[in-house]
Amino acid sequence: MFLKIIGIFAEFERENIIERITLACEKKVKEGYTLANFTTSYGYDREKGERIQTVNKQEAKIVKEIFIMFVEGNMSYNAICKNLNHRGIKPKLGECER
């Protein structure tokens, strides 16, 4: 019986942790901060030491193309990657896998 009670408390705490993390992420995004702490998202720039990303207009055009290829063109991630590599468009950190 004691182990069941401990299990119930552990499950309750787990759900509280999930809820707190979700709320913290939502708050961070609403305030304009990025969830990408170590790398800058494609389509954005972030100066060293800054917490808020700014839109990179050239990369933002590519991001829109990627969404169109995925949603309207029904292209797979791999097909999109090959298309971008073929066109010479590289991600911020090297090259995506083929």
Image (cartoon, helix red, strand yellow):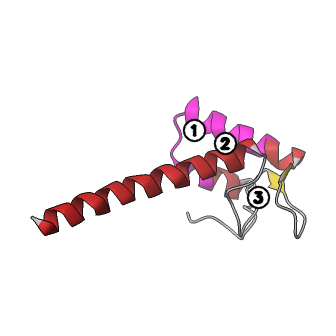
Residue drawn at (53%, 53%) of the image: 20
Asked if residue 5 is positioned above or below residue 67 in the image, the reply reads below
Check if mark 1's residue and mark 2's residue have beta carbons within 8 Å: yes
Marks 3 and 2, the one that precedes in the sequence: 2
Looking at the picture, how far across and down is residue 16, in whole percent?
Answer: 43, 53
Three-letter amino acid code of the residue under disc 2: Ile
Alpha-carbon neighbours of circle 2 within 10 Å: few (<14), some, or many (≥20)?
some
Q: Circle 3 sits on which residue?
A: 88
- Circle 2 sits in a helix, a strand or a loop, which is it? helix
Quadrant assignment for the N terminus = bottom left
Q: Which mark identifies residue 70?
A: 1
How far apart are the two marked residues, 3 and 2, measured between alpha carbons? 14 Å
Residue bearing mark 2: 66
Magenta range is 61-81
Q: Is residue 8 magenta?
A: no
Q: Residue at x 62, y 64 (%)?
A: 96
As drawn, the label of residue 49 is none
Task: Work out how far the residue at label 1 is from the one at label 3, CA to CA, in angstroms.
Answer: 19 Å
Query: Measured from the top left, where is residue 50 in percent x and y?
Result: 87, 63
